[in-house]
Amino acid sequence: MTRRAEIITVEVGSTITKALAFADGKVLGRASALTTPADVSVGLGQAGARLEAACGLALADAGRIYATSSAAGGLRMTVHGLTRDLTARAAEEAALGAGANIKLVTAGKLTERDLKKIAAIRPNLVMLAGGVEHGEEAAVLANATAVAGLALDGPAIFAGNAALQEEVRAIFARAGREVEIVENVYPRFDELNVGPVRAVIQRLFAERLVIAPGMEALRKLAGGNVMPVPAACLRAAETLAAKVGDLVVVDVGGATSDVHSVVTGPSAGNLEPQIASRRTVEGDLGVYSSAASTWAAMGRKGRPKPLAPLPDTEEEKALSRELAAACTELALLRHAGRFIPSAFLPDGRVPVRGRDLRGVRLVVGTGGALAALDGGLESLRAAIAKHRREALLPGPDAQLRLDGDYLFAACGAFAGEFPDLAVALMLRSLGGWK
């Protein structure tokens, strides 16, 4: 009798397409294939065939299929607010947390140069923010008019001053463009409201946005619902944090390196408002397609030796480990906040700015470069120890673990419906938890 998998997850990444089968609370089988950019359904079919060969389970054998994708650069967005440190930052936080690959962030009234950049990027989504509730109006409406006039295929999102919602809706209607109206992402000073707009971005990605040729085959398998890979990883982090407390997940891939953190405790002396869950993405840090820019970020001259998508020789593995260590260090350092030197608050404390990770209990390394190659744990340990005095990084008592079964993103895909199963699988992948 053919076994039936309770859940199969399929991830179409920029480099690798992966399929995992789960039943009875464990991994039954896994397989992968190179992603085929000209038609991602080809790589999907290859991964499915290899899964069946490995464990006798075809994609058709799943009770449920969950799909994620970051192919063709993922969800391309541009984000436009009024002030860089306030509404533009709030909008950026919301978009990143939804799994977007942000190509442009602007602050203030859009210029002709800005509009030319947006047109050249051809984003899947454009997000407009600005104006606290019943605040600034003129610049917000000018930006809406300018974006509505661009010849773009994708919809726009307005998450600004609620007093302008009907006017913004009318501006886009007159231009024959679609706009989604969402709650203000920065309704009051020092208050971030990212949840509603994150949900809308992920819904639009899943329901309507075609990101790569052949993606319809993946949608059909998953019943129309495809989640951005980074959003799945953030959901995995949030689901696990509900069980074990504040944590950081460092995901080093071939094209980008993402850091996801869930921090619920207070940040003493912080000069910036914080949200519970945050993602940052470093588009110049990766071990395959971004290897050259990683090399430059390391301060090296020239270019690294060419690498295969899956390193095979000892020389390739050694170079991949070196690049992965650099990605880990730089991505963590960019994600974390900083002490503000030579400054003191009235109570004598040293002020800080940005993401405060000092109270984090668990740091997880995932992605093929950290989870599948040797040296991932050492890369995490060295990165944190090296910069702890200058950045708001986890303390020496934080536990460092690897996603040994390389399934965090897969668990995030179904964590919304099966959180207990996702947590059990992630804890097992980490080797347990104390």
Image: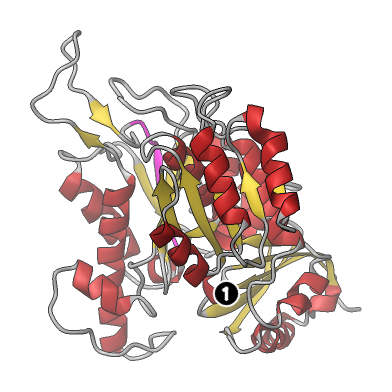
* Colour scheme in use: secondary structure
155, 247: nearer the viewer: 155
Q: Quadrant of residue 161?
A: top right
Q: Which residue is mark 1?
A: 71
Q: Is residue 102 left or right of residue 74?
A: left
Image location (x, y in percent) of residue 316: 30, 86
- Amino acid type indicated by mark 1: Ala
- Determine the residue positioned at 22% across, 23% down: 351
Image location (x, y in percent) of residue 365: 41, 57
- Determine the residue positioned at 56% across, 35% down: 185
Q: Residue furthest left?
A: 342
Figure quadrant of the N terminus: bottom right
Q: Is residue 49 left or right of residue 367?
A: right
First to last magenta residue range = 359-366
Instruction: Give the overall secondary structure of the magenta segment.
Output: strand
245, 390: nearer the viewer: 390
Q: Is residue 346 above or below residue 372?
A: above
